[in-house]
């Protein structure tokens, strides 16, 4: 039987809402500095990046354009399939633009390495990656993630956009799930 409150299934809180907002603000300041004098398009990877996109965009005092892509690389479980499919492409042309892909987590890096090479083939001025979280496996991929909030251990986490079977995205904190949820 499901618990009524989304917070009840968390076994450990890794990052609180306040810590997350402070970290996003810190990333926003670095990004503002680096893209000073340049137009910037941030591209959110649906659905997980919804929260970090919304907080990052509002942490900027500069102008920024937002667009979205949806790709699938995961089934409904906790393991990467390695297969990437575009479910929703960008609305706009990125030719000549400075593109910053925003994601909530890089695990194996398969999704973003595929995505950034796909975007690079469309003639942008630049393509970089910002992620709130990064897991250890990502360091084995030839993928450069310019902005990382936190490096975390190889644990499955939920909250702040991160889901387990489409649930828990609306948790304000980020944490790990109790094992009874998986069984
Ligand atoms: P990657 O291709 O292995 O880097 O995985 C990318 C996607 O897998 C992320 O954007 C998430 O949607 C999902 N993912 C990876 N690790 C986790 C996790 O710990 N919790 C929830 N989703 C995850
Ligand atoms: Mg994602």
Image (tube, grey):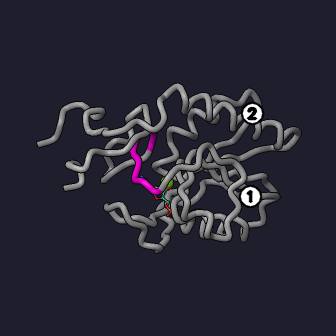
Q: CA distance from mark 1 to mark 2?
A: 18 Å
Secondary-structure class at tag 1:
strand
What residue is rendered at 53% in x and 65% in y? Answer: 108
The response on whether ligand 2 sits within 8 Å of label 2 is: no
Secondary-structure class at tag 2:
helix
* Residue picked out by circle 2: 29
> Where residue 28 sits: x, y (%)?
70, 35
One can see residue 68 in this view: no
- In the image, 116 versus 23, the foreground residue is 23
Nearer to us of marks 1 and 2 is 2
- How many other residues sit within 10 Å of disc 1, few (<14), some (14-19) or many (≥20)? some
Q: Which residues are magenta?
A: 154-161
- In the image, 58 versus 80, the foreground residue is 80
* Residue picked out by circle 1: 127
Is 2 a magenta residue? no
The quarter in which the N terminus is drawn is top left
């Amino acid at each position: 039987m499901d618990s009524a409150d989304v917070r009840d299934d968390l076994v450990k809180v890794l990052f609180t809402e306040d810590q997350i907002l402070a970290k996003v603000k810190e990333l926003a300041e670095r990004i503002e500095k680096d893209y000073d004098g340049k137009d910037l398009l941030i591209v959110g990877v649906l659905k997980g990046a919804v929260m970090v996109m919304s907080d990052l965009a509002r942490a900027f005092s500069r102008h920024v354009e937002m667009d979205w892509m949806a790709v699938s690389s995961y089934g409904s479980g906790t393991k990467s399939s390695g297969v990437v499919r575009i479910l929703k492409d960008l609305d706009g042309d990125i030719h000549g633009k400075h593109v910053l892909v925003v994601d909530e987590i890089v695990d194996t890096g398969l999704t973003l390495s595929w995505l950034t090479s796909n975007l690079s083939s469309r003639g942008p001025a630049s393509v970089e990656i910002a992620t709130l979280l990064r897991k250890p496996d990502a360091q084995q991929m030839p993928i450069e993630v310019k902005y990382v909030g936190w490096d975390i251990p190889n644990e499955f986490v939920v909250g702040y956009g991160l889901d387990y079977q489409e649930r828990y995205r609306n948790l304000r904190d980020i944490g790990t799930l109790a094992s009874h949820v998986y069984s």
